[in-house]
Amino acid sequence: MKYTKKALAILAAKESGKISSNAIFWDLYYKNKIDEILDDEMVLGNCEELELKFNSIDDNYEYEEGFVCVYDEDFPLINPKVKNKSEKPYLLFYKGDISLLKNINENVAVIGLTDIDDEIRERETAIVKELIEKKIVIVSGLAQGCDTVAHKVCVENEGKTIAILPTPLKKIYPLENKELADEILKKGGLIVSEYYKEVNKEVNKKYETIKRLVERDRLQAMFSKAIILIASYRKGEGDSGSRHAMEAAKKYGVERYVMYNSTKDENNIKFALNKDYINDEEENVKRLVRKSIEEIKNIEKKELIEKKELIEKKVSVEQMVLM
């Protein structure tokens, strides 16, 4: 497993409860107090335990697996428009090609509802194929329905895709997509998560599970230059989790598109959220049309390009490849 000493220490601090939230981490980070936490006796003890644990696992990894922290060169650039410290990740667990998060200007999120029909599947497939032809990396959440179509079209057409999980890497969710997750890795893709452990059964499991799903959704927007909503119900009318990713994209300045045909979809409840976005000028959401794919390809947000001098400011740490 690949990780740096700094990343291991930060994971140990998280496990020790010394860093209990994203906001607390970033408060300490901006005050240059992270090292004080990492020198804590409990954290150092946890660090040793974690290292022994990782060393005890057989070296049987077919694909690169590891975790990165904000100090590491492999950690992705965080969109500077993410102002809320509670929304900014600082530790990510991954399997596959972590470099797919290196240039966010190559990434586009494709999202939507879980209970799709054949027509939605066909229309989405055509869109994703066009994106792949433009060498765009597809970001999605490995959920059933639209997410599954987005990932499958990639692996079947030599495209690259990133699956962001609301669960630890060892606990693929939903379980039905375990084989799809394996295919993503075989085709040179990436699976990534903020979570090292499953939801604690002693807390409100349902609440925490939903919270993780919403947190996953905001990463889909954060790690993309544009987001495409294939189809979605309104809130309260059915599965509408996609709205969280769309709302995050709006805050982060990520271009938003929706698939919507006014003739076909006007009275289709599965396109109700798409319709609302199109009809609300203040939302500034674009309808996906023929020329949109080329337009999306040409989007380059300067704030999503990590400058060389910023990379050099990251703490230099010795890489440790274990197991």
Image (cartoon, rainbow, N blue to C red):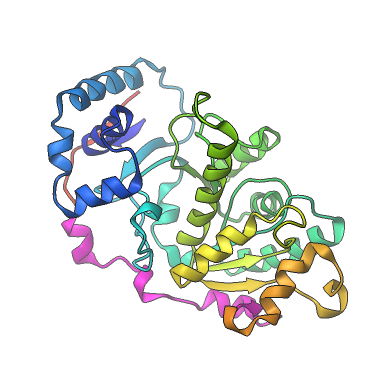
* Image quarter (top left, top right, bottom left or bottom right) of the N terminus: top left
User: Is 181 left or right of 238, judged from the image as shown?
Assistant: left
Name of the residue lying farthest toward the top? 56
Residue 259 makes an appearance in the image:
no
How many tags in the picture? 0
In the image, residue 66 sits, relative to residue 316, either above or below, namely: above
Q: Nearer the viewer, residue 272 or 311?
A: 272
Where is residue 200? Give x, y as percent. 49, 27
Residue 270 on the magenta segment: no
Where is residue 11? Give x, y as percent. 30, 33
Residue 286 on the magenta segment: yes
Where is residue 85? Give x, y as percent. 33, 56
User: Is 80 left or right of 164, judged from the image as shown?
Assistant: left
Where is residue 129? Give x, y as percent. 69, 63
Question: What residue appears at the point 13 percent right and 31 percent down from the top-left corner?
Answer: 39
Displayed quadrant of residue 133: bottom right
Question: What residue appears at the point 54 percent right and 32 percent down from the top-left corner?
Answer: 204
In the image, residue 188 sits, relative to residue 2, either above or below, namely: below
Q: Nearer the viewer, residue 178 or 247?
A: 247
Question: What residue appears at the point 37 percent right and 50 percent down from the top-left corner?
Answer: 89
* Image quarter (top left, top right, bottom left or bottom right) of the C terminus: top left
Residue 63 makes an appearance in the image:
yes
Magenta segment range?
Answer: 284-313
